[in-house]
Amino acid sequence: MATRVAVSDGGNKKTSRVRVAVRLRPYMNKEDEKSEGPCVRGLDSQNLEIINWRNATETVKYHFDVFHGEQTTQQEVFLSSVKPILPHILNGQNASVFAYGPTGAGKTHTMLGSSEQPGVIPRAVREVFKLVKAKDESDGWDYSIGMSYLEIYNEKVLDLLSPNSHDLPIREDKDKNILIPGLTHMNITNFADFDKHFVPATLNRTTASTKLNQRSSRSHAILLIKVVRTQQQLPHRQQTGKLYLVDLAGSEDNRRTGNQGIRLKESGAINLSLFTLSKVVDSLNSGTSVRVPYRDSKLTRLLQDSLGGSAHSVMITNIAPEYKYYFDTFSALNFAAKSKLIVNKPFTRETVAVPVLPVKRSREERETGGSGTEPQKKKHKEEKKSEHDGSSLIICLELKEKQRELESKAMLFSQLAGEKSITGQEPDFENKTTALRRKQSDATKPNKQQAVVQPLQVSQRQPLQQLLVVKKQSVCVKKKEETCSDLIESLGGKENNTKSAWESQLDQSMVDQSKQKILQILNTGCLKELKSLQQIGDKKAKLILGWREIHGHFTKVEDLIQVEGMTEKRFSSFMKANIVSAMGK
Ligand SMILES: Nc1ncnc2c1ncn2[C@@H]1O[C@H](COP(=O)(O)OP(=O)(O)OP(=O)(O)O)[C@@H](O)[C@H]1O
C-alpha cells in the first residue's frame, strides 16, 4: 500500500509553459511548387508568415518557440523540441508531446517517421532508456519502464496492444487520477523490447485513404511510457512519471477530403474531439475558474493530466505549404498561437511505501507488480486544481472551433475563387504565392496571439476582388447591428435589463411566435439567413452552423447560449433585438 504525497522540492512549484513548435513539410509534388509556390513560409527559426486571406496584399506573421522549415530533419526536430523535456519523467513528472495539424500535413511523419527517418516516438523511447541507464547505478533509485498504447477511434478507447479488446472505460479516482481499467501495460527493458510490441501494435491503428492522404490516420494514437522509480533505501519512496506521445488525427474539411459514409462519421468524431480540445485550450487560457470541458471528449478526458497543469508539454503543429491547405494552415497557426498561452505547473508524483512493508523488493518484483495499471492512489493539493491549471496537449482543439469558423470562410472563399471575375479573368489568389516576397514594413504590432499583420505595398499587388467582397459583407453586418441597437434603445431597454422588464411590455403570444420564428432560423437557416438575424454577424453565423453540425438542433432559443461567445448578456440583447424585429414584420 502506498500513499500519495506532495513533494515540495524546489522544482515542483515552477510553472512550465507549453512549448509550441511549428513544422512546415516540403511540397509533396514538385509541380505544385513550381506552379503556385507556397502560401506560407518561414522567416527565421521562430517566425513565419502566411498570406492574409482578408487582404492578399498583406501577410500575417506568427512567432513561436521554434519554427522548423521544410529542410528540417527528424533529428533536429527531436533535439530541439522533444529531448529537453524527457528528463522530467525520471523525476516523477509528466511530459507530453503531441502532433497537431490538418490531415496530410505530416503529423505521423513527425511522430512515427519511417525506418530511414525515425520520428519523435522511437527517438524519445531510446532517449528514455539512455537516461535511465545513465542514472541507474549511481543515484540510489531503481527504475522500471512500461508502455501502453491506445487509440481513440470514433470516441472509443481501443487498446492497440490487445486489438481484440472492446471500448475501454475512462475512470477518475477520488484524487482525480485518470485510469483506464483493462488497458494493457507492458514492462519493457530495452528499446528492442519496446519495438517488438510497438511495431505490430501500430499496424492495428485505424487508417484509411482519403482524397488528401492515401494513408490517413483516422484515430488519435496515444503512446504512454511510464517510468517508475523506487528508492533502494527505506522508506522506498516511489515516483511515477508519464510520457504521452500523441499523434492526433488530422483536422479535416470534408469538402476537400471527399469523405462519405464511414469516413464522414469518423471525421465527425475526429472534428468533435479536436473541437473539444480547442474549448479546453480556451478555458485553460482564460485563466478563470470556469469548468474546463475535459469530459466533453475522450481525448481531452484522457489527456487531462497532460493538459491540466501537471505536465511539461510540447505541441508540434504540422502545416503544409500548398494552397489547398491554406485555411487549414491558417486555423492551425491560430490555434497554435493561442496554445502558447497555456501554463503548466509541473509537480512530482510520489508514493511512499507504508512502513509495515520495509522489506526491500527485488527489481523484478517491482517491475511485475508496480506498474500494471494507472496509479491507484494519488493525493496532491496541486493536482486537485489541475482542471483549472493550463497545460498542454490540447492545443488542438481550439482549432476545431477556428476550423469551423474558417471552414465557412473557406467555403465562401472557394466559391468566390471558383467563379470568374466580372472581367472574365480567373481569380488570381492562387497565382500569388510569390507574393510572400513582398516589401516589408517595420511597423509590426503583435497582437495577443503573437500574430502580426504585415502590410504590403499596394502597388505591388492589387487586392483580390473576391476578398473585397468579403470585406463589404462585414460592413453590412456592422450597419445592421447599429440598427438593432437603435431599436433596443427605442424600446427603452438597456443591455442589462431583465427579461421580464422588457418582455412584459409585449404581448406574450407575439413573443412566443417570434421565438418560434427565431428558433426556426437557428435550426434551418443557411449562413445568409442566420446573418439576417439581428446581432448575428458572419462569425457568429458560422459558429452557429458549427454548433448545429456537432449538436444537431437547438431545442429552444436559449440553447444559443451554448454557442461560443454568446454570453447571457449578449443572448438577452439578441433576443430583445430579434423579437422586436420579428414583431415588426
Ligand atoms: N517533413 C517531411 N518530409 C518529407 N515527407 C513528409 C514530411 N512530412 C510529411 N511527409 C509526407 O507527407 C505525407 C503525409 O504525411 P503524414 O501521413 O505524416 O500526414 P498526417 O498529418 O499524419 O496525415 P493524417 O492526419 O491524414 O494522418 C506522407 O507521405 C509523409 O511521408
Image: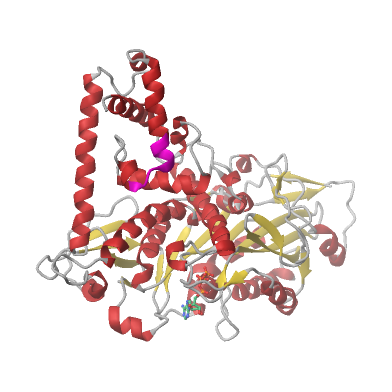
Q: 359 or 397: nearer the eye? A: 397
Q: What is the quadrant of residue 151 in the picture?
A: bottom right
Give x and y (percent) for residue 80. Answer: 48, 71
Q: 422 or 108: nearer the eye? A: 422
Residue 45 visible in the current orientation: no
Which residue is at 47% across, 64% downward?
Answer: 101
Quick check: 259 above or below 349?
below
Give x and y (percent) for residue 391. Answer: 53, 51
Relative side of 207 to 140, left or right: left
For the C terminus, the quadrant is top left
Which residue is at 36% across, 20% downward?
Answer: 510
Give x and y (percent) for residue 501. Answer: 35, 14
Give x and y (percent) for residue 508. Answer: 39, 16
Secondary structure predominantly adopted by residues drawn in magenta: helix
Q: 149 or 499: nearer the eye? A: 499
User: Is residue 393 located in the magenta-colored stretch of the structure?
Assistant: no
Which residue is at 67% across, 73% downward?
Answer: 202
- The residue range painted magenta reads 520-527
